[in-house]
Image (tube, grey):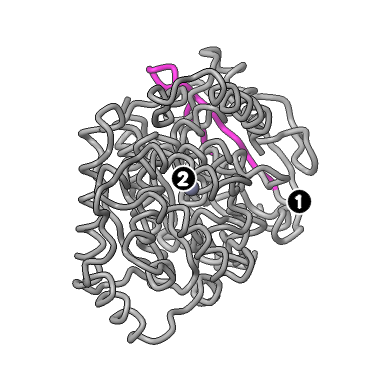
Amino acid sequence: MIKTNSNRRQRASAWLTLFALFIMPISVWSQTKISYHSNKYKPTDDVKVGRQAANEVEQQMPILRDAEATNFVSRVDQRLVNSIPAEFQHPEFQYYFKIVNARDINAFALPGGPMFVNRGMIQAARNEGEMAGVMAHELSHVALRHGTAQASKAQKYGLLAGILGIGGQILGGPAGAAAQIAGQGVGVYFLKFSREYETEADILGAQIMARAGYDPHDLANMFQTIERQSGGGGGGFLSDHPSPANRYARINQEAQYLRVSDPIRSTGEFERVQSRLRGMGTASTMAEIAKGGTRYPTGENTGNYPTNAPRGSVSLPSTRYQNYSTLGGLVRVSVPSNWRELGSSNSVWYAPEGAYGQYQNQVVYTHGVNLGLGQTQSRNLQQATNELLQSLGVGNGNLQQRSNLQRATIAGRTGLTTTLSNANEATGQTETIVVMTTQLRSGELFYLIAVAPSNESGRYQTAFSNILRSIQLND
Ligand SMILES: [Zn+2]
């Protein structure tokens, strides 16, 4: 969705390189300087959102619990982390890799340090350097703070529903209201980067490799290995994951400036771990794993994100209620006891089983309540609410506003409410969506969004008004 002018930039840098070849004395040739993109967030925000996303990922993905393999990957990780250039070090970040027990050749990183590498990736690498190469690439996305830089960029387009609430917009495409504001799929949200970011992660990755004593050419080689083993880019790390056209050449070019004497070729450990993993039999693919249950992000590649659409038929809300303290302790709410809490620090959903799932790279909800915080540009409640509605895509496609903004009360405060209608993207059912907003003392917008199919909304009225009445804001 986010358009970059990376082509133009690539062309420009090609010219610069050519130019440099002619005018610069050889001694001036040096490593490419990488710098941060503008970022509205603090490094501690990276840590916060990354930790939440990691929790979600770890609940949904099969993590390989094998001490020998995990310890080996951690040692390589440590060597790489110690080699991050000073300007990209963040003392608050906690880098770690977990192995996902899946066959697909894939890996991904979350802000602040949590990273995941598939068993398939380790098995595919031809040597330790190639495995370290992918890890250095992922590490570089984290060190360069690409996840939150991307979120900062997205917010220029007016959607400020909170860093974890903007997945829908990033992924683009038509989406249900519920999908667009979903704080879910945080994994997915951070997984896809522009080619520009990919190139930066390749270059910094090569530099980190060299500083750690690995041959940076192995990073370039790994991309060839991935391509070969995924059958011409059919699935995994490379398919749909934007791969810079000249990736292999670009990394090798950078490698010229990176001298490594006697690079680490093989420690024997890699081979031991690899044969250990191979001895475990064939791992399931992410798609197979997904069939078994809930939502599974599949790595940097979101193209084959498993579709597990919401069924649309769910059990009625329980008349028993459960209390939650959510959104960082800011909100207390009580919801039907058969609804699950799904979400993050800035956007949380309460929904019954069967009411949420993946549909065309979006998390879609059919029934439930979403509570969230949005940093809108306006402190005027009406303007801020309109900004929120715009960010949800109201007025585009099927999502239409059915009533003007009306006064309402939330948690004893003045608020606004409106009703929307939509055709749910996953089920096609007409749904009624009630949006309510009020302002926190900080000026942030607090919103509540209740969603149910129109022909069932009568059955949800009691639950929705009980939830609304239970809300307490502690700001
Ligand atoms: Zn990448």
Q: Position of residue 87 (x, y in %)?
A: 29, 27
Q: Which residue is mark 1?
A: 423
The magenta segment is 432-448
- Residue 71 is left or right of residue 132, and the answer is left
- Residue 332 is left or right of residue 266, and the answer is right
The residue shown at (66%, 39%) is: 1
Amino acid type indicated by mark 1: Ala
Q: Position of residue 404 (x, y in %)?
A: 72, 25
Q: Given this view, does label 2 or label 1 mark the residue nearer the observer?
A: 1
Amino acid type indicated by mark 2: Ile
Residue 281, placed above or below residue 7: below
Q: Label 1's element?
A: strand
The prevailing secondary structure element of the residues shown in magenta is strand
In this rendering, does residue 280 appear at all? Answer: yes
Q: Quadrant of residue 4?
A: top right
Numbered circles on residues, count: 2
Residue 141, placed above or below residue 23: below
Q: Which residue is mark 2?
A: 467
Q: Are marks 2 and 1 in contact (CB under 8 Å)?
A: no
Residue 320, placed above or below residue 123: above
Q: Quadrant of residue 271?
A: bottom left
- Residue 68 is left or right of residue 33, and the answer is left
Q: Position of residue 53 (x, y in %)?
A: 39, 49
The residue shown at (44%, 71%) is: 124
- Whether residue 445 appears in magenta in the rendering, the answer is yes
The residue shown at (40%, 60%) is: 337
Label placed on residue 347: none
Quadrant for the C terminus, please. top left
CA gap between label 2 and label 1 equals: 24 Å
